[in-house]
Structure formats: C-alpha cells, structure tokens
Image: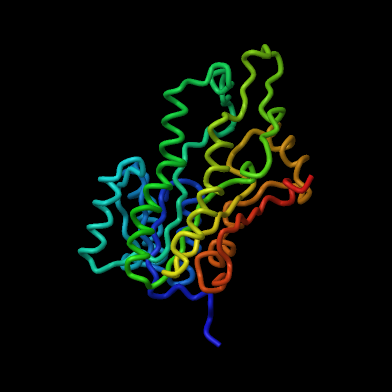
C-alpha cells in the first residue's frame, strides 16, 4: 500500500512563510517530499528563511516570492510566475496574519482595548488575516479547480476560533482598568471567519477534488514572559504550551491523501484548553 502521507510531486504555497509557524509548515511538507513556495511581504526575512531551509532540504525544492496577500495583482503575479515554470499549486496554506504577541518586556498596550481600537488597525488586520485568505483561495483555489486534479486549502485558525480570549492573561499589576491590555477583537473575528470560510470552500469545489480544512493551534511557546506562560499553562490540561514543531504531523495529515475523506472541518490542537 502506498504511503498516503507522501507529497512527492505536490507543490505547496504558504503565505506568511517567514513567521514562526510558517517556517514550521514548510519543514513539515518538505519532510514528506513536497516542493515549497514560500511567500511573505517581508523580503529580507523571507530570503533568510529560504536560505536556511535550502541548506537542509536542497535548493531545487524551495521557491520564494515577495507577495502581499492584500493585493490581487501581487497574488496573480506569483501565479503567473509559477505557471511560467510549469508549476501548479496543489496545496495552499493560508497562514498570513497580524498577531500582536506577548513577549518579554512588552505590552499589547491600551490601544488594544475595544474602546480605543482604531478603525485603521481593524481594516489592516482584517485585510491581511481574512481578506488575504479569501484572495488566495479565490486565485489559487480557482486554478486548482480549473485543472481538476484535486487540491487542498488549509486555513490556519486558532483555538480562539472556538473559545473567547481570557483577558486575565494580559493584565498588568498597577495599571488602570481603562489602560489594561487585551487580546484585540480582530484576532477572534479573523480566526472565526477563517473557520466559516473553510466550511464554505469545502462545499464549493468538491466535484473538482478541492478539499478545505482549518487547523486551530493553541499557544506556541516563543519567548513569552514567565508570568504570562504560567497563567496560560494553568488553563491547559496538558500543562504546557506547544513547541513550534508539534504541528508537523497535523500539517502532513491535512495536506496529504491521508486525510482524503476529511473536508470542511476545524481541527483544534490546543493541549485540551478548549474543552475546559
């Protein structure tokens, strides 16, 4: 019986590929034989990421493009370039997002609060995290459907697509209530929106063999402050945050024929946080 996790001959495009999880998604697919197209708006970070991956997995398996997911012209330019190389995308991972991070010595700030949240910031974050996924699904998904060779769209959501953020995680001692930082409203709206988009796309091109699922990771350890980590891990039955590479097998499953009968689903992998 053939290895249903084998991705040899498949071409996978990842948005936001220069970010923490973007590079891990790339590693997961490269490990199973896929050719990877890294895209990100941050050219310098993207080139560093491409070089690091190429040193391990080989130059021939990795392409990189500066791409703005909020621009149809930018996305179409990448599609045209790939077609000129006789490459057809069969896997799309919508990973690009703007996510305010809690790192040592930083604060989300009072501007994160709903009362103070600027419309310009709302528009920016929605345009990247949700509109960007729509545009990439529209353009690359349409190309997959036209070829009628099947394909996979994987939207990277979050455990906050199914639960609300616990704002106590972000509280700071000695800070007035009106200035307490919070997880911004945009994050929850975008991640829940991606799950809705997943269900829609799963029923849009089934005859062409295009499947769509969402992956909702929990918190990933990445230099957060000790106090924040202690608060968060107290909410997780597994008793810890995820390490960056713990989603490799899920990515390999969801992007391969191993999940051929799975579509329209939101797979939550959060150490059990959302069951409490």
Q: Residue at x 58, y 52 (%)?
A: 244
x and y percentages locating residue 60 in the rendered image: 31, 68
Q: Image check: 229 left or right of 125?
A: right
The picture places residue 222, in percent across and down from the top left corner, at 58, 42
Q: Is residue 213 above or below residue 134?
A: below
Residue shown at the point (75%, 45%) measured from the top left: 236
Which residue sits at x=50%, y=49%?
197
Residue drawn at the location 66% of the way across and 54% of the way down: 269
Give the colour scheme of this rendering. rainbow
> Is 239 on the left-hand or right-hand side of 61?
right
Does 20 sit above or below residue 258? above
Question: Residue 204 location, x and y as percent?
Answer: 46, 59
Q: Is the residue 243 above or below the residue 60 in the image? A: above
Which quadrant holds residue 266? bottom right
* Quadrant of residue 11 within the rendered picture: bottom left
Say which quadrant the N terminus sits in.
bottom right
Vertical comparison of 225 with 78: above or below: above
Front-lying residue, 226 or 163 = 163
Q: Nearer the viewer, residue 46 or 258?
A: 258
Residue sitting farthest toward the left: 84
Q: Where is residue 218 in the image (x, y as percent from the top left)?
A: 64, 47
């Amino acid at each position: 019986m053939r290895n249903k996790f084998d991705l040899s001959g498949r071409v996978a495009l990842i948005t936001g590929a220069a970010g923490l999880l973007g590079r891990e998604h790339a590693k997961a697919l490269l490990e199973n034989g896929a050719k990877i197209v890294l895209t990100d708006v941050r050219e310098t970070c993207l080139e560093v990421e491409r070089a690091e991956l190429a040193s391990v997995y080989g130059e021939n398996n990795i392409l990189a493009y500066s791409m703005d997911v909020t621009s149809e012209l930018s996305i179409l330019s990448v599609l045209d370039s790939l077609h000129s190389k006789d490459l057809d995308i069969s896997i799309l991972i919508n990973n690009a997002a703007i996510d305010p991070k809690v790192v040592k010595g930083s604060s989300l700030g009072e501007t994160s609060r709903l009362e103070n949240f600027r419309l310009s910031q709302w528009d920016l974050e929605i345009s990247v995290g949700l509109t960007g996924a729509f545009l990439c699904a529209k353009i690359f998904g349409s190309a997959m459907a036209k070829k009628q060779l099947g394909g996979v769209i994987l939207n990277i959501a979050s455990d906050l697509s199914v639960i609300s953020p616990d704002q106590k995680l972000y509280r700071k001692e000695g800070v007035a209530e009106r200035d307490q930082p919070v997880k911004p409203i945009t994050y929850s709206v975008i991640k829940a929106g991606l799950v809705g988009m997943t269900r829609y796309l799963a029923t849009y091109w089934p005859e062409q063999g295009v499947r769509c699922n969402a992956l909702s990771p929990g918190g990933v350890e990445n230099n957060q402050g000790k106090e924040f980590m202690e608060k968060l891990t107290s909410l997780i039955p597994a008793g810890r945050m995820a390490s960056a590479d713990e989603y490799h097998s899920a990515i390999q499953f969801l992007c391969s024929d191993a999940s051929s009968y799975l579509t329209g689903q939101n797979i939550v992998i959060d150490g059990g946080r959302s069951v409490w």
